Structures are given as C-alpha cells and as structure tokens.
Amino acid sequence: MRRVTRRCAITGIISAAALALPFAGSGCGRRVASEDEIASSEREQMAAVATAFMRNFDVPGLSVAIARKGRLVYDSPFGEANRQSGERVTVSSLFRIASVSKPITATAIFTLIERGKLRQNDKVFGAGAVLGTRFGTPPYKSWVEEITIDHLLTHTCGGWDNSSDDPMFENLGMDHAQLIGWVLDTKSLQNPPGTHYAYSNFGYCVLGRVVEQVSGRAYPDFVREEILARCGLGDMRISGNTLEEGAPREVIYYGQNGEDPYDMNVARMDAHGGWLATARDLVAFLNHVDGFKSTPNILRPETIRLMTTPSAVNASYARGWAVNNVPNWWHGGSLPGTTTIMVRTASGFCWAALTNTRRPGQPDMGLALDNMVWEMARKVSAWKV
C-alpha cells in the first residue's frame, strides 16, 4: 500500500441505533431533501465519469457512495464483481479496502485514549511499556524503546516503512507475534522516533496489537463492537487471503501487470489494510467521525481535532488521516487487485469509492479514483463541493 499523495485533491478542495439513523434500513431508499436531489441528467453525467475511469484503467467493478450533511444521497455500483460469471457489483458488494483501514484503527486507538486506557505518549516496547517485552528478544535495537503510540499513528517511528522490503509483505507464513518479533530482532530503525516521516504499514500492525493488549479483545472484535456497531455497521470483517476464503457478497479481485491479488497474507494486514466493506459502510463510518453536527460522532470534538491535526514532521498527514488546510481529510488504499479512496470534505460531504483491481505505475490509478469522485460530485449543480 503506497503512501497517500493527493496533490490534485489538495488543490481542488483534498448506542448504535441512534447514531446510525441517517443510514438505517435501506438508507438510500429514503426521500432526501430537495437540495440533495440529483436530476436524471446529472446522474447520467456522474455515471459517464465513472465509466470513463473504468475504461481508462480496465476496472471490472466499482462502487461509489456519497453522503451530504450526514445523509446518503448517492449509492451506485458499476460493472462486474465477477468477470467469469458476469455477476454485477451491487451496493452490498464487499471489497478489500486496503489502507483505508488505517483511519478505522486510529479511531480505535483514540477510543481507548478517551476511555483513559491509553495515552498518546505511552511507550510501546520495553519494560513498563504497553507491549512490554512480549515481542522479540531484548535488549532491543537502537531507539526501539523510544517509540510511542503517537509515533506509530503519525508514521514517525523511525523506520519499517512501505518500501521494497515492507515487513508486511515478507514471511507470509508468520502470525502477528512471530512477524513483530522477527522485525524487532532483525530490522533496525533508520532515524530517531519523531524526527522523520516514513509511511509504515507495520506500525499500524503494531497498533492493532496495542488495541488487543489494552482492550483484552481481538482487534477485529474490539473494532466491530466499539467502533462499527456504534456506526450501525454489522457486515464489515477482515479479509481472507485466497479466492476460496472469500466472504459472501465479496467481489473477485483482478491483478494487472503480473500482480496476484491472492498471493498475500491480507488477514495479517488487519489493522493496516485488512478490512472488507461496502462503499456505503465507509460513508457511514465517516459520518460518525467527521466532526460535523449532522450525525452524532463516536469521538469527542477535541479528540477528532487531535486525530486530524498534522504532525510536526509532515503537514499532510495527521493520525491515520491524510489532511490539508481546507480542511479535508481522506485516506487511499492500494493492494494488488484493489484501489480505494475515502474522503471527508470541509463542505459537508463524505464519500467512498472502491474497485476490484489495481494498475501499478503511471498514471496513478489512486489519484485518478480520487479525482473521479470529485468530478462526479461536481456534476450536481446544487452541491457545493
């Protein structure tokens, strides 16, 4: 999963039942306020933008959902979930969301912080730290015992980045504990924590283990029970690895340029890239952490501000969210067979777009997907995006 760089987006903008009312039941089937109505001609123009993107990047299937001021106003599937059978994508189709998982994990961490179970500046490894010495073999390499929760959230732990030797794509047969131990024992940090930004999938893998240590529950269980349920969501789950392990309603993934979507340990990516969701699921999640008053948020306003405030090291990345000074918040995701985007705009929109393929190289498919949704939203004359 590559670091999110949304230059065009930056310049162009870039108990559960009560909380989930805007998305209750059929959601998009409810009549919306007149200013949210989409004319048939505008809907056709939106579809034309989507199909052009699909044609340009050979995308089999696409799902797009948009909410305005907390209300789902657009939820449209395009193309095929399975090219072999001809099965179409529906609004209920599940996709791997890749690194769009990171804002979900950040929300879990800040939930524990709000409850007094954790502090941002808590150390992660070493005697007296959150994870203590349960992983790897002390004494640890230089700077490891200086890493804090906030360093992991902001990708400033000092190393273990998303490069050609990203730990999350090595030793696929290892479980979380074995992998973390191996990294601590064999891979040195390149910089003191807090001094350098380096996008780290592994860092968010470690945050998943922090959630487990502090909550006493498996990471997926804590997220489902304490985050997703409060957003009215019950179908999201962690992906399997193989085609045979696909979930009901999950799309088939198609690699390009030799990539194999089924030759990864996606389940082990849980906290940094392992979730399955529909586009409307992600919009419902966004609507409960967007800081707006149209839908009750599951975090306090001051917590949301902190979560979306950039670090001192990188003005474009906060804590689980890419940000700009508009302020818009977003995160993209990219894996073989998957390209995704999730955006919260300062103008009151939340949207998500999911595909079942990835084309590596240039032009950047992730950036094009981001631009696609902005262009679709601008086709509606009543919307001020």
Image (cartoon, helix red, strand yellow):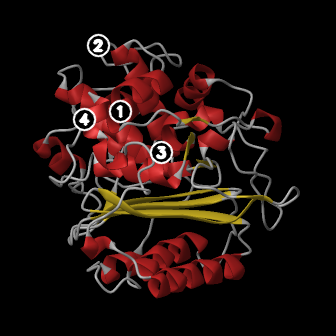
Q: Where residue 209 sits in the image (x, y, percent)?
A: 45, 24
Disc 4 vs disc 3: which is toward the camera?
A: 4
Specify the quadrant of the image occupied by residue 118.
top left
Name which residue type carries label 3. Answer: Ser
Disc 3 vs disc 1: which is toward the camera?
A: 1
Disc 4 vs disc 2: which is toward the camera?
A: 4
Q: Earlier in the sequence, mark 2 or mark 3?
A: 3
Name which residue type carries label 1. Answer: Ile
Q: Where residue 68 sits in the image (x, y, percent)?
A: 30, 65
Measure the alpha-carbon separation of dots 4 and 3. Answer: 24 Å
Q: Where residue 15 sits in the image (x, y, percent)?
A: 26, 27
Mark 3 neighbour class, 10 Å CA radius: few under 14, some 14 to 19, many 20 or more: many
Tell me if 372 is positioned left or right of 11 in this view: right
Circles 4 and 2, Cβ within 8 Å, touching? The answer is no
Tell me if 82 is positioned left or right of 211 in this view: right
Mark 1 neighbour class, 10 Å CA radius: few under 14, some 14 to 19, many 20 or more: many
Return the residue nearer the eye: 383 or 178. 383
What is the number of the mark on residue 128? 2
Q: Earlier in the sequence, mark 3 or mark 1?
A: 3
Measure the alpha-carbon separation of dots 3 and 1. Answer: 12 Å
Q: Where residue 334 sits in the image (x, y, percent)?
A: 59, 58
**Residue beneath disc 3:** 101
Name which residue type carries label 2. Answer: Gly
What is the number of the mark on residue 18? 4
Q: Secondary structure at mark 4?
A: helix
* Residue at image coords 21%, 28%: 113
Return the residue nearer the eye: 162 or 319. 319
Residue 210 vs 128, above or below: the answer is below
Tell me if 20 is positioned left or right of 220 in this view: left
